[in-house]
Image (cartoon, grey):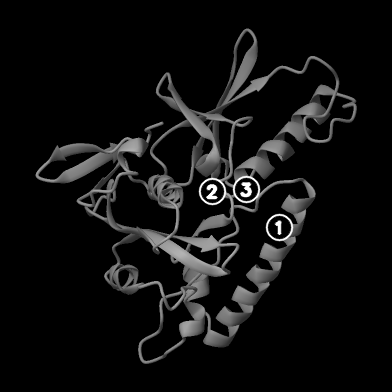
Amino acid sequence: MTDGYAGVEVIARAETMLLVFRWRRDPNVYAIEVDYPRSPESPMTGEPAESADEWAQHLGWHLSEELGTGLVHRARRTLRDGRVLLDVDNAPDVGPPGFHIDSVQFDDDDHRGRSPGRRRFGQLRQEVTNTFWVAWNCLFRRRLYGVSLTVPPEPAGESAPELWLTEPAMDDTIPRRLLAAGRLACWVRTYSEHGGVFVGQAAASWEDDERTTARVEVLYTLPGVPSEVRHALARHMIVEAAGGGALRVVTFIDDPVLPRLGFRSSGAGEFTVGTAHE
């Protein structure tokens, strides 16, 4: 259906079917509940579907769009029978109004091996794709989500600041250091649509060689930015760490938004949350 998706099974129930799948390297098992069709209408277009096969195909297209535009990040979650049930109909925007949140992708080996000129071309091509998705989602009254820009590590002896998509006000020292050490689990940023600048970021490192635990190293927003933005940053970071294989996320950062995401004290000033938390 889309990159990162691996189907597990479809469970038929009395009133609904349950589509069970895995996402990227996430150790959690996800599920989406789908009603049986009560009329021969396409779940994608609303037009009549001529067969069960056509209905199923259109459902696949619909879910592919939802997953491709960040459903795993933005959907309301319920833990049921050991699975993380995603609510397709209750999937709010990832960021608060006026702010866009995405991940800085840094593990694309093919992109990393390109020359600076080709990397820049790839970045521009992604920006064109980004513009297309903005127009598409605006057409359907949706907020853009899920188009991330690939950022390669800076080659030794070469200065290419235009390849690092951070604003001067944003200190990216820690994410860079973690990346150089091979420990960067995820790097998330938020962009102000009103100010036209990046106003916050979060980063986590791998705590163990097995990559089952991620540690929050950075979580902040610039002064004047609502705390809801920091909450959204942290939530996005947890899901992104899970996508890399994390079973839990830990931190020594004591931020008021973290308990709302399920973080609890585990002693010695540390806080922890499981990645399957609702």
The structure residue drawn at horizontal position 26% and vertical position 50%, both measured from the top left corner, is 210
Kindly identify which residue carries mark 1: 133
Taking the view exactly as shown, the residue that stands out farthest to the left is 268
Location of residue 119 with respect to 47 vertically, above or below: below
Residue sitting at 39 percent across and 63 percent down?
A: 223
Between marks 3 and 1, how big is the CA–CA gap? 9 Å
Upstream in sequence: badge 3 or badge 1: 3
Image spot of residue 171 (x, y percent)? 35, 73
Does dot 3 land on a helix, a strand or a loop? loop
Could you tell me residue 119's position as x and y percent?
Answer: 56, 79
Mark 3 or mark 2: which comes first in sequence? 3
Q: Residues within 10 Å of mark 3 (few under 14, many from 20)?
A: some
- Left or right position of 265 against 176: left
Quickly name the residue at label 2: 96
Q: Residue furthest top?
A: 14
- Residue underneath mark 3: 69
Crowd tier of the residue under label 2, counting other residues whose Cα lies within 10 Å: few below 14, some 14–19, many 20 or above: some
Residue at left offset 38%, top offset 38%: 27
Q: Quadrant of the C terminus?
A: top left
* Nearest to viewer (mark 2 / mark 1): 2
Amino acid beneath label 1: Trp
**Amino acid identity at mark 2:** Pro
Quadrant position of residue 92: top right
Amino acid carrying label 3: it is Thr
Residue 149 sits in which quadrant?
bottom right
Residue 76 picture location, percent across and down: 51, 32
The CA span between labels 2 and 1 is 19 Å
Mark 1 burial class by Cα count in 10 Å: few <14, some 14-19, many 20+: some
- Quarter placement of the N terminus: top right
Query: Quick check: marks 3 and 1 in contact, CB under 8 Å?
Result: yes
Q: Is residue 46 above or below residue 167?
A: above
